[in-house]
Image (cartoon, rainbow, N blue to C red):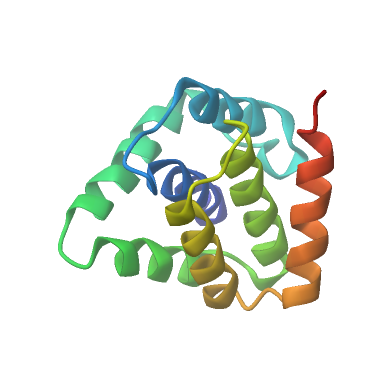
Amino acid sequence: MAAHHSALIHTMVLISAADREMTDLELKTIGDTVRGLPVFRDFDPATLPDIASECVGMLQGEDGLDAVLDHVAADLPTKLHETAYALACEVAASNGSVSQEVLRLLEILRHHLNVDRLLAAAIERGVRARYAHL
């Protein structure tokens, strides 16, 4: 497993766990992402549960949020920072509504990954358009 795979998965799990409830829709979004995106082409999906559990364990530790964010920043190449932010937004939007905790964590993640505010707004708008319904 490549470090960038772990960092991307940890980013998605982090957002899913932000409101203390990882829903089936969020978990399905993470699974679909891992099985469908080119960045995960050489990833073994069978390792997904272990990587997700590792992230949850890190979050439960002392300074858990900082530990996960530091891991993501250390193991994610700069050119995948926008991808990580986009994946986080996808997971956040998968439930149909986004809590204040998730919005705050997205802001923290954006700052931690140095994703430009205007670029982040464009990513967020694109995700909103993808999840829009009547």
* 9 lies left or right of 126: left
x and y percentages locating residue 131 in the rendered image: 76, 33
The residue under the point 40% across, 71% down is 70
x and y percentages locating residue 92 in the rendered image: 57, 43
Q: Quadrant of the C terminus?
A: top right
* 25 lies left or right of 40: left
Name, please, the residue furthest toward the front. 134
x and y percentages locating residue 105 in the rendered image: 47, 61
Query: Does 111 appear above or below 35?
Result: below
Residue 44 in view: no
Residue 109 in view: yes
Query: Does 57 appear above or below 104?
Result: above
The residue under the point 59% across, 50% down is 88
x and y percentages locating residue 19 in the rendered image: 37, 45
The residue under the point 35% across, 34% down is 21
The residue under the point 59% across, 70% down is 110
Question: Nearest the camera: 98 or 1?
Answer: 98
How many badges with numbers are in the image? 0
Query: Does 126 appear above or below 26?
Result: below
Write down the quadrant of residue 31 in the picture: top right
Write down the quadrant of residue 93 in the picture: top right
